[in-house]
Image (cartoon, helix red, strand yellow):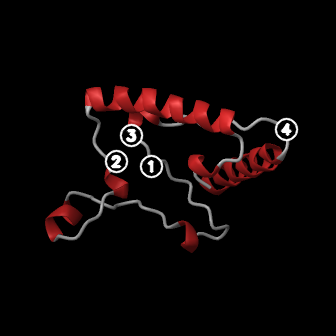
């Protein structure tokens, strides 16, 4: 699910606002894309470790890859914070389950 798909406009809009603020900060310091999620179509890029350590979620036992894809300054950030009302409660639970599975998978 992407932020744009979220059912509650207020939570979605707050998440987008937080992402935009962080996006401006990242652009100011111009952090590079992490090496492990870069494509490596050439031998040189492979030698420079592009794509090294990439985990494809569909190949993982639980379908969840314990891998951070954000630049270092955004690592661990949570943007969408669903409420405990309506369908957002379902989303909140699903996100918590994925987080727990990622933690368990990373051990």
Q: Dot 3: what SS? A: loop
Q: Position of residue 40 (x, y in %)?
A: 25, 66
Nearest the eye: 99 or 7: 7
Disc assigned to residue 69: 1
Q: Give the residue pinned by disc 2.
A: 34
Few, some or many residues within 10 Å of mark 2 (<14, 14–19, 20+): some
Query: Earlier along the polypeptide chain: callout 1 or callout 4?
Result: 1
State the residue at coordinates (59%, 69%): 60
Q: Dot 4: what SS? A: loop
Q: Are marks 1 and 2 in contact (CB under 8 Å)?
A: yes
Query: Earlier along the polypeptide chain: callout 2 or callout 4?
Result: 2
Q: Dot 2: what SS? A: loop
Q: Give the residue pinned by disc 3.
A: 71
State the residue at coordinates (48%, 37%): 75
User: Relative to residue 40, is residue 76 drawn left or right?
Assistant: right
Q: Give the residue pinned by disc 4.
A: 85
Q: Residue furthest front?
A: 9
User: Relative to residue 107, is residue 100 drawn left or right?
Assistant: right
Query: Earlier along the polypeptide chain: callout 1 or callout 2?
Result: 2
Q: Which dot, 1 or 4, sits closer to the camera? A: 4
């Amino acid at each position: 699910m992407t932020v744009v798909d979220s059912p509650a406009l207020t939570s979605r809009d707050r998440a987008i606002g937080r992402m935009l603020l962080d996006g401006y900060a990242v652009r100011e310091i111009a952090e590079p894309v992490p090496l492990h999620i870069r494509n490596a179509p050439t031998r040189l890029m492979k030698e420079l470790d592009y794509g090294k350590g990439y985990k494809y979620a569909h190949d993982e036992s639980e379908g969840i890859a314990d891998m951070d894809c954000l630049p270092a300054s955004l690592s661990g950030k949570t943007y969408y914070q669903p409420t405990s009302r309506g369908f957002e409660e379902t989303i909140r639970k699903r996100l918590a389950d994925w987080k727990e599975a990622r933690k368990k998978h990373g051990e």
